[in-house]
Each structure stands twice: as C-alpha cells, then as structure tokens.
Amino acid sequence: MRVLGIETSCDETAVAIVEAPAGSGPGGSILANVVYSQLTEHRRFGGVVPEIAARAHLERIDGLVTDALTEAGLGLADLDGIAATGGPGLIGGVLVGVMTAKALAFAHDKPFLAINHLEGHALSVRLTAQVDFPYLLLLVSGGHCQLLTVHGPGLFTRLGTTIDDAVGECFDKTAKLLGLGFPGGPAVEAAAKGGDPQRFALPRPMWRKPGCDFSFSGLKTAVRQTIEKLAVEKLPAGDAGAVADLCASFQRTVGDVLADRCANALSLAPSTTLVVAGGVAANVYLRGRLETLAAAYGARLVAPPVKLCTDNGAMIAWAGIERLRLGKTDGLDFRPRPRWPLDPSAAVRV
Ligand code: KG4
Ligand code: ZN
C-alpha cells in the first residue's frame, strides 16, 4: 500500500510517499520525503505570515509532488491514495494542500484522505517504531500542547491541554526576546548547551496541581522580565554566559512542567508506552527528562526520529495509510478546517 502525503498547514511545504503492508500494524518505509521550508520568506518578520505562507505553498507544491514521485521512482498510477492535511492550521495553506490532493485523486481515480494535522503527529511514531494502540501521547508543537490517550486512528481521549500558550510558542518567544532567531526551539536548545540550568528560578505554572492541563503564559512573562532586569543591571563583561544560563534554566523549567504533567497522566491513565510527538519533541534534553519519568512509572518513552518531529509529509502519508486500511476515506466535498480537535467531546467540555 502506497500513499502520497501533502503537508501545508504552516510554513513547511512537504510531500512524502510512504509504503506499508496492507495489514494493521506499525512499520512503514519512506520512499520519498521532500520538504521546502519557508524560513527565508518569514525570517525578517520574526514569525509566520499567513498570506506569504499560502502563496509560497502554491508556488512550490506542484514541483514538490513531481520531486517526490521522481525520488520514489513511481508514477501517480502506482499510488493507492492521496492524503493531505485538512486542518487545523493556517487556512490559506491548508486550502492549497487539500485542493492539490483532491485534484490528483480525482484525475487519477484514487481515494482522497483528509488528515487532521494533529493526528499526523499523533500516529507518526508508528511509522518507525513498534508501538501498538492504546498509548499515552504528549503532543507538543508550535500551536498545541496536549496529553491524550490514542486508541486508534480518529479515536482519542484528551486528558489535558494548555489553558493559554503552546510550549513551542514559548520557545519561539524566548528566542525572539534573546535575539536568537526563528524558529526558536532549535536556537534555544543550541544556546542552552553549557548553560547553568539552576541559575534562574522561573515559575512552573500548573506544577504539582491535580490534572493534566498546562499553562505557559506566566513562564513567557517571567522570561521577558528576567531579560529586562538583566539589561537594566547591565551585564558585567564576565557574564557572557547569561544567555546560555537563561536558555538552560528555561529548558529545565519546561522539563519540570512536562514531566510533572506526564506523571499525573501516567497515574490517571496508566500505559506502558509514553509517546512524545510534535516539533518540540525534537528537543533532546526534553526527551531525556521524559525518558527518566517514564522509567519511574515502568513505562518506555518512544519518539519519532528527530527529523520526523517537525512538520513533514511522511506523517501525513502514514496517517493516510492507517485510515485507508480502515476504509476511512473522504469525499471530494471535504471542507478544510481551521480548527479540528482530536477529541471533540473534550473540546466541548472546556
Ligand atoms: O510540529 P511543528 O513543526 O509545527 C506545528 O505543528 O506547530 O512544531 C514547531 C514548533 C516550533 O515552535 C519550534 O520552535 C518547536 O516546534 N521546535 C522545538 C525544537 N525544534 C522545533 N522546540 C524545542 N526544541 C527543539 N529542538
Ligand atoms: Zn505540526
């Protein structure tokens, strides 16, 4: 079974082709995986500009589909389905991906699959690792921070979510305030190397509170105030390590909060497997913290390879395979969704 996956919900234009046996288990092969990152387009604005993103997706998408087919040595006739992110995300970009996938599916008489971007992250671990349902998932990205039990494609129970900012957003903001560039996550992780993680005591919102919800706005504010204070105090010449120390302290604080929330989730919904996915899951320090936590609960931590944590087409193609196997295809009348919760009953409760 071979599915082409298109991802255009934010600032990466990505296309991949994934192959897997027709059964139901984990494990697939990535036959092609091409990503065009729009970093240069957005860098001077310090963040993603939706209109620029949509236009850049439109300019690149056809060429990337051709590149992916060439890389895999396949024609469209060799595919069993065409999948695209159908939401949530920046709607202009989602429209480009969905319309491209629908057109290919219609012209070549293939099933079309509209994939929830979050489901793409949630199931991606099964593309490369032997992980069976159900499992506990910490989904941490630029727009989301949630704990869920994953029962299967389309079957999620949300245990907790952020009441304000997403954790990736907090990394991006910290990097911006420190002038480390965009996207912030990898920049903060690199800057934290060699820094003193205990130097700055930052607030840990929700830490040791019951439940599995998150909050990051207070941490974001505290980072800003710390930077302002350091600027007023005029760093002595010998304090060149302040940026490294602040990044390391920030990262340690995020680690404390994520570990604490996951501990509650493992108590409330015990699981032998804790999965971390989404862009922030690329952070090696945070993976280490979660690994230790999981072990304390007799569970194993599993994460996708670092390059499959940030947005990519392979996770969309894989989710497409999981859904195609179950016959969960979509009509060409599917409407792209700017919002699309994984667990609609939880979204109503909040
Ligand atoms: O999943 P993703 O690529 O896009 C969304 O669906 O949001 O996640 C992007 C987020 C950004 O906020 C980025 O700064 C963060 O993931 N990120 C990281 C790292 N790499 C990417 N955060 C911390 N450490 C990293 N190494
Ligand atoms: Zn994402």
Image (spheres, rainbow, N blue to C red):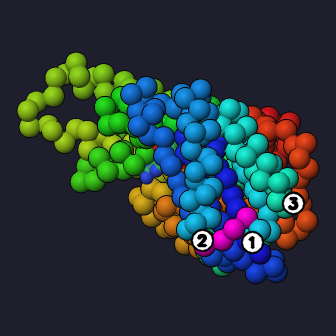
Q: CA distance from mark 2 to mark 3?
A: 20 Å
Q: Which mark is residue 72?
A: 2
Q: Residue at x 24, y 26 (%)?
A: 230
Determine whether the beta carbon of the residue marked 1 sits less than 8 angstroms from the nearest atom of ligand 2.
no
Q: Earlier along the polypeptide chain: callout 3 or callout 1?
A: 1
Mark 3 packing: few (<14 Cα in 10 Å), some, or many (20+)?
some
Query: Where the N terminus falls, by quadrant?
Result: bottom right
Percent coordinates x, y for residue 200 in the rendering: 32, 39
Q: Which span is picked out in magenta?
A: 72-76
Q: Secondary structure at mark 2?
A: helix
Q: Residue at x 77, y 59 (%)?
A: 82
Of the pair 38 and 272, the residue shown nearer to us: 38
Which residue, given by chain and number where applicable, does mark 3 sit on?
Answer: 109
Left or right position of 70 against 149: left
Q: Secondary structure at mark 3?
A: loop
Q: Quadrant of residue 92?
A: top right
Left or right position of 142 against 286: right
Percent coordinates x, y for residue 32 in the rendering: 58, 67
Q: Quadrant of residue 52?
A: top right
Q: CA distance from mark 1 to mark 2?
A: 10 Å
Q: Earlier along the polypeptide chain: callout 2 or callout 3?
A: 2
Prevailing secondary structure of the magenta residues? loop
Residue 89, compared with residue 138, is above or below; it is above
Whether label 1 touches label 2, CB < 8 Å: no
Which residue, given by chain and number where applicable, does mark 1 sit on?
Answer: 78
